[in-house]
Image: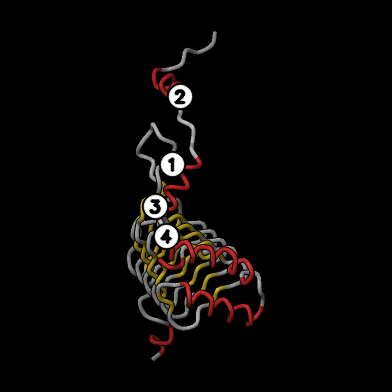
């Protein structure tokens, strides 16, 4: 005999049957409402010029990308190391310190405001975002509800490992190591090592360097 659906399953099925259709016009209106003309111009530059500069190899590629993103960032200090294949999005919202390094395949978005300290390393295929979709209204498709801007901060001397994800609204404290594949969903402690999904502290970095101990 087939099992009778539960009340919850029936409610979900009914909701799915009557789910509203997404409107492309509403999505476009939301986009225009969330971006200034200058922001749209910056996005176009990121997409078209960024596509030309993104794959360039060697020091020439590093130098050209450094100059390009210096024009687009809200603030960019020193010489950044933006490796081939790294994708930076909504650069007008990014403020970065010295020796900022973003490796191949990483995606970094400043749409909601992203502040990065000095000496930060972003590993291959890592994802750092500062917005999320709104989803509170169940009678409207998520894609029509716009975005919540959640400023995100990464302190000094942080290493974000390969394939790690830093979610919007979090503060990754100075000295943190985010292990490969970890998903940071909440603030970290200074000089902690975090791992897992969601990321949890699994250790701490030594408080003194080998050179200091030798002295």
Q: Nearer the viewer, mark 3 or mark 4?
A: 3
Residue at (37, 80) in percent of width and height? 208
Q: Nearer the viewer, residue 9 or 133?
A: 133
Residue reaching furthest bottom? 215
Task: Tell me the residue at 48%/38% (across/down).
Answer: 23
Q: Earlier in the sequence, mark 1 or mark 4?
A: 4
Q: Position of residue 177 (x, y in %)?
A: 43, 67
Specify whether 80 is left or right of 55: left
Q: Kindly state the secondary structure of the residue where label 4 is placed.
A: loop
Q: Which mark is residue 100?
A: none
User: CA gap, disc 1 to disc 4?
Assistant: 17 Å
Label 4: which residue? 111
Q: In the image, is residue 19 above or below residue 32?
A: above
Q: Earlier in the sequence, mark 4 or mark 2?
A: 2
Residue under numbered circle 1: 144
149 left or right, relative to 72: left
Choose top left, top right, bottom left or bottom right for residue 190.
bottom left
Looking at marks 2 and 3 on the same chain, the residue that comes earlier in the sequence is marked by: 2
x 47%, y 26%: residue: 16
Which image quarter: residue 117? bottom left
**SS for dot 2:** loop
161 and 74: which is toward the camera:
74
């Amino acid at each position: 005999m087939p099992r009778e659906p539960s009340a919850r399953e029936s409610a979900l099925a009914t909701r799915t049957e009557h789910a509203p259709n997404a409107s492309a016009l509403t999505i476009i209106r939301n986009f225009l409402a969330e971006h200034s003309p200058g922001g749209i111009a910056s996005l176009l530059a990121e997409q078209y010029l960024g596509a030309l500069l993104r794959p360039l190899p060697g020091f020439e590629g590093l130098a050209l990308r450094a100059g390009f993103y210096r024009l687009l960032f809200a603030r960019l200090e020193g010489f950044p190391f933006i490796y081939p294949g790294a994708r930076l999005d909504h650069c007008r919202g990014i403020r970065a310190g010295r020796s900022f390094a973003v490796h191949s395949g990483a995606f970094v978005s400043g749409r909601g405001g992203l502040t990065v300290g000095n000496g930060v390393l972003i590993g291959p295929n890592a994802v750092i975002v500062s917005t999320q979709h709104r989803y509170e209204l169940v009678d409207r498709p998520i894609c029509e509800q716009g975005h919540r801007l959640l400023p995100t901060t990464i302190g000094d001397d942080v290493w974000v490992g390969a394939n790690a994800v830093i979610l919007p609204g979090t503060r990754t404290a100075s000295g943190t190591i985010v292990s490969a594949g970890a998903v940071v969903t909440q603030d970290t402690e200074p000089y902690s090592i975090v791992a897992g999904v969601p990321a949890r502290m699994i250790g701490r970095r030594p408080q003194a360097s080998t050179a200091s101990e030798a002295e």
